[in-house]
Amino acid sequence: MNFIQTLAAAWKKNDSLLCVGLDPDPARFPASLRGKDEAIFEFCATIVTATADLVCAFKPQIAYFAAHRAEAQLEALIAHIHAAHPGIPVILDAKRGDIGDTAAQYAVEAFERFRADALTVNPYMGRDSIAPYLAYADKGVILLCRTSNPGGGDVQTLEADGERVYERVARMAAEEWNENGQCALVVGATYPAELARVRARVGDMPILSPGIGAQGGNIAAALQAGQTRDGTGLILNSSRAILYASAGEDYAHAARQGAKAARDAINAHRRRPPETAND
């Protein structure tokens, strides 16, 4: 299956729109992991095991691995997720953005070295900057659109030819760039009005929506704005609120409880299609 199909199956199997972001910060690890050579892998793999039945995706952030020279641990972690929890897609959060041969090398890194199922990409250099990723037709290409950070509006909400920049990105993603049906968008849960505008432009295209945890995005508002008619369409990411629910040795249990609470809170506001009557 390709990324979009795998994601749809995970939405259904786990009855979940929750994505757990894997942003490992060794300074916040429990005492038993500090100083261990494979601490980052062990911490993240333990979180994955504790939450895999509650999520629709995992999203490792590459900077948290690269800053600690732990790219090999990231590679091992993605392989572990695929082997131990098949059917849960892995989104590599790298926000790559370059052109030509450089973009092609980033695509090889994400999809051949790390074997991620999808990659976040910055589209603001235009189609030629995302074409190398689109060439991997079975992989997801998740384009930055209206990001969750306060400064995102400095550029993304500017108007050009009668539409906002983020609206132009959404329209081009849906109408011009999605030839293989592999595109998705990043739209923050912190901006539900913009999320609704994007959803109106892109139909059922998946939207990765960060911000429901530590950033304070409102779950009910995000669901109202961004879910599709069947109550899916969103990948609602929470990272720190789940990863660091406890600083103690019970961190895996606390992470599971946090993920379950987030999943259940999301489901409380989801639209449910009517049951098909039996003949």
Image (cartoon, rainbow, N blue to C red):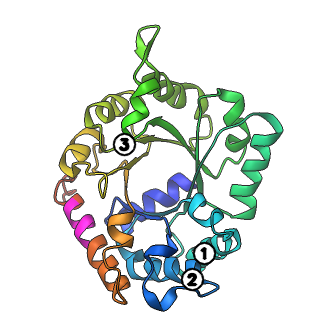
Write down the residue under mark 1.
Answer: 77
Which quadrant is the C terminus positioned in?
A: bottom left
Tell me residue 233's x, y (percent). 37, 47
Q: Earlier in the sequence, mark 1 or mark 2?
A: 2
Which residue corresponds to the image point at 47% horizontal and 7% vertical from the top-left? 161
Q: Earlier in the sequence, mark 3 or mark 1?
A: 1
Query: Element under label 2?
Result: helix
Q: CA distance from mark 2 to mark 3?
A: 30 Å
Up the image or down, 261 lies above or below 159; here it is: below
* Main SS of residues in magenta: helix
Is residue 42 toward the left or the right of residue 249 in the image?
right
Q: Residue furthest top?
A: 161
Which residue corresponds to the image point at 54% horizontal and 84% vertical from the top-left? 42
Whether the residues at callouts 1 and 2 have beta carbons within 8 Å, the answer is: no
1 vs 2, front mark = 2
Instruction: Examine the image and state in which quarter residue 224 appears.
Output: top left
